[in-house]
Image (spheres, rainbow, N blue to C red):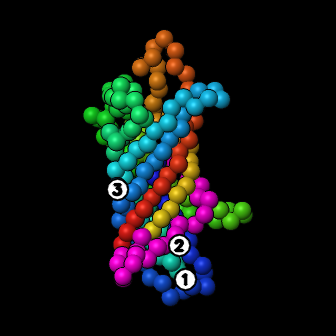
C-alpha cells in the first residue's frame, strides 16, 4: 500500500547527491474508499506508517521506497467494524500485524505523470502494485536552516481478493457485498 517517488528538474539535478528521508509516522497516512455498487460503503485510513525513501536528485528513477503499514491502525470511524476487520476473520492482525511496500521502479508517463511500481506484502501475499502520482513530490526547506521535508501523494487501487481477503467469513449470509476494488489515497511526509 504506501508510496513514493521523487523527481527533479534535470537542469538543476546534476550537482545533487543522494539523501535518505525517514517517513514521519504522525503525518503520513493511507486513506481508503470501499464502494457498494455506485455508493460509498465505507471510508477510513491507516496511520503510523514508517520507513525510508532514498532519493538522488540526479537519478530520481533510481530512488527507493520502503514502507511499513501497521494494520491495527485501521480506522473507519466504526469501532465494531474495525475490530471485526483486524480480527481473525479478515486481516488477522495477530498473524499478519503489518503490510510492507517495496518500490521497484519509477516511470514517467506520456502525460507527464509519474507511476511508481513496487510490491505489497499483505496478509501473507506478495503482489505487484502501481501508484499514480498526479504531481512530482516536493522538497520543502524548513525555516532557519532546519531539516528538509519531502511531501508526496498518489493514488492506487487494490482487489482485496488478490491478498486472500474476503468479507464472507464476517457475513456468511452474503448480506454485505462490496466492489472488489478498494481505492487508496496515499499521503507521505518524510524528513532527512
Badge 3: residue crowd in 10 Å (few <14, some 14–19, many ≥20): some
In space, the residues marked 1 and 3 are separated at their CA atoms by 28 Å
Residues tagged 1 and 3 counted as in contact (Cβ below 8 A): no
Expressed as whole percent of the image width and height from the top left, the position of residue 172 reads 45, 14
Which range of residues does the magenta coloring cover? Answer: 128-149
**Residue 96: which quarter of the image?**
top left
- Number of marks drawn: 3
Picture disc at residue 25: 3
**Residue 24: which quarter of the image?**
bottom left
10 relative to 117, above or below: below
Membership of 143 in magenta stretch: yes
Look at the image and tell me whether residue 80 can be seen: yes
N-terminal-most mark, 2 or 1: 1
133 relative to 157, above or below: below
Residue at x 65% of width, y 62% of height: 113
N-terminal-most mark, 3 or 2: 3
- Position of 151 with respect to 68 (left or right) is right
In space, the residues marked 3 and 2 are separated at their CA atoms by 23 Å
| Residue bearing the label numbered 1 | 13
Residue at x 48% of width, y 65% of height: 151
N-terminal-most mark, 1 or 3: 1
Q: Most extreme residue toward the right, as rendered? A: 110
- Position of 115 with respect to 5 (left or right) is right
Amino acid at each position: 500500500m504506501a508510496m513514493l517517488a521523487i523527481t527533479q528538474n534535470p537542469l538543476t539535478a546534476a550537482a545533487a547527491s543522494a539523501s535518505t528521508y525517514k517517513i514521519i509516522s504522525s503525518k503520513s497516512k493511507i486513506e481508503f474508499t470501499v464502494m457498494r455498487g455506485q455508493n460509498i460503503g465505507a471510508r477510513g485510513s491507516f496511520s503510523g506508517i514508517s520507513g525510508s525513501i532514498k532519493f538522488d536528485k540526479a537519478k530520481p528513477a533510481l530512488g527507493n521506497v520502503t514502507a511499513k503499514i501497521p494494520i491495527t491502525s485501521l480506522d473507519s470511524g466504526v469501532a465494531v467494524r474495525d475490530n471485526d476487520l483486524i480480527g481473525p476473520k479478515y486481516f488477522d492482525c495477530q498473524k499478519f500485524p503489518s503490510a510492507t511496500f517495496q518500490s521497484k521502479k519509477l516511470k514517467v508517463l506520456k502525460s507527464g505523470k509519474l507511476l511508481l511500481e513496487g510490491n505489497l506484502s499483505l496478509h501473507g501475499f506478495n503482489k505487484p502494485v502501481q501508484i499514480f502520482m498526479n504531481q512530482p513530490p516536493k522538497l520543502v526547506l524548513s525555516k532557519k536552516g532546519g531539516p528538509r521535508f519531502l511531501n508526496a501523494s498518489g493514488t492506487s487501487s487494490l482487489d482485496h481478493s488478490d491478498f486472500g481477503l474476503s468479507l464472507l467469513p464476517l457475513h456468511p449470509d452474503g448480506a454485505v457485498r462490496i466492489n472488489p476494488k478498494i481505492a487508496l489515497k496515499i499521503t507521505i511526509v518524510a524528513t532527512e
